[in-house]
Amino acid sequence: MLAFQFSRSSLAKFQPLNRLFSQKPVTQDKQTKPYRNLQSPTRTANCTPEAFPTKCDVAIIGGGGMGSSTAYFLKKKAGRDLNVVVVERDNAYSKASTPLSAGCLRQQFTVQENVLMSRFGAQFLHSFKSEIGDEVDPNFKTYGNLYLVNEKNAEKLAQGVALQSQLGVKSELLTNDQLKKKFPWINTDGIGLAAFGCVDEGWFDPWALLTGLRKKAQALGAVYIDGEVVDFEFKSKGGAEYDAVDKIVVRTAQNEQKTIQFDKCVLSAGAFSGELAKKARIGTGTGLLSTPLPVEPRKRYIYVINSQGENAPPPTAPLVLDTSQLYFRREGANFITSRSPSSDQEPPIDNLDVDLDYFETNIWPYLAHRIPAFESLKVVGSWAGYYDYNTFDQNGVIGKHPAYDNFYIAAGFSGHGIQKVPAVGRGMAELIVDGGFKNIDLSLFRFERLIEKRPVKEMAIA
Ligand SMILES: Cc1cc2nc3c(=O)[nH]c(=O)nc-3n(C[C@H](O)[C@H](O)[C@H](O)COP(=O)(O)OP(=O)(O)OC[C@H]3O[C@@H](n4cnc5c(N)ncnc54)[C@H](O)[C@@H]3O)c2cc1C
């Protein structure tokens, strides 16, 4: 296990800081895997080549959080009558965003739909046992989220909290003095205001959520196929402007190419959805098809640290989102922390190696400033994953593509998707089975906003 032990202040006196991380960035296999047990979900006999379906009602591309949630809610809603096939290219989910996520859930967003989606996420996690079963436990830790802003952003934070409380969220605003009293382990310099979401906020195990949803979807009859969707086939619609998307072309685990004809298709391939959308002519065609799906992989690091200092945040400390945009939270005896790079710092995406220098220069100084106990710490592990990054407005694209009657998208959640997995899956099922959203109206996130160049203005995302 990777472990560096040091104290910023003491070492800075005696040696250049860069010597602390003089090792080359470690490769993924030497890094700590996310803290969960990464066993593969049980596969069904449906994955055998003999059982390969040639037709289905709904084909879902990608069986990560969004795809599996959609499969589960579709089967829950429509039952046996609806034949659902999920095509997943990596059943170990080694590069999928879902299991590599930090698993944080907060209701502190500034757009109503984002608040409501997280609220349903919390409700779903609370009722996980009755809804999904007790084979896996998402271990929802409701220690809260503490959102810190500087003076300049104080008013916006207060406005956000006002909206959230109208929607039933229990969060309280804390002045600098109140913050100091309540959380004496925080250095409050530069903090104008804080919001503490103290009910139904915290973090959970995303792997358990995925495993539970997938297994339950399978138990209800959804078929998971081991394979990669590599293309689409189209059929002409007479004189219509756009052909219909008719089949997915799947490269199977046995390296054969097969097709599945569908009535409806859901693109939920996470960070790789933008690339695959091009095969469905989205972004390569004319008219409504000239606008691409702006979703691409962006590498993000998570470091596992152990505080060596005094007055460290206690085991029940909330997740803290700092003014510097870094966040940290408890993970057992350790903490995990991350901070997104600026646009000129975006790391290459051809591998999931972790850059330890990034921690030294872009995280540690801010962490130690905010939490003096982190002046002295051990980096005991790290991992990287891909944000399913929507370059347009960093919010999910949810709904039917306007050029097609039967092609749906759930992708691009950009670092705040895991908490929305239950709400998006339920919404997609409503759209497909009922023809419209029933619980939360998610039409704000439709593809048309990309064409109309109307971004969703969510202020509470880094
Ligand atoms: C480091 C990190 C930290 C994060 N922290 C948080 C957090 O704290 N809170 C939060 O809300 N969100 C967080 N997120 C974001 C969240 O994890 C994602 O938004 C969410 O998991 C996206 O789910 P998904 O199903 O769309 O994507 P994925 O989980 O990536 O699933 C997509 C699936 O599609 C499959 N696939 C891709 N292409 C094909 C193909 N051609 N054929 C077949 N299958 C294919 C992939 O193998 C994958 O399994 C974080 C993400 C990362 C990387």
Image: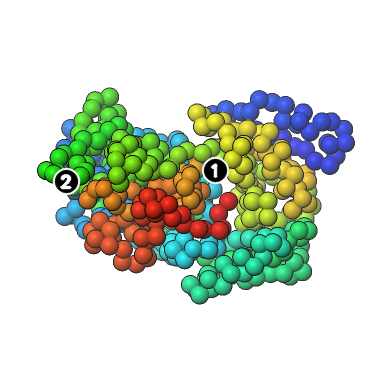
Where residue 20 appears, as percent x and y from the top left, is 75, 31
Residue located 36% across and 60% down the image: 443
Which image quadrant shows ligand 1?
top left
Residue at the disc numbered 2: 240
Query: For the residues marked 2 and 1, what is the alpha-carbon distance in whole angstroms?
Result: 51 Å
Q: Quadrant of residue 384?
A: top right
Q: Is residue 427 left or right of residue 150?
A: left
SS category of the residue bearing label 2: loop
User: In x, y percent, where is residue 114?
Assistant: 46, 61
Confirm whether residue 72 shows in the render: no
Residue at position x 84%, y 37% in the image: 12
Instruction: Return the residue found at the far left.
Output: 238
Image-based side of 209 in relation to 380, left or right: left
> How dense is the environment of label 1, judged by Cα within 10 Å: few (below 14), some, or many (20 and up)?
some
Q: Which mark is residue 35?
A: 1
Question: Seen in the image, is 277 located left or right of residue 187?
Answer: left
**Residue drawn where x is 68% and y is 39% of the image:** 359
Amino acid type, mark 1: Tyr
Closer-to-camera residue (248/13):
248
* Figure quadrant of residue 255: top left
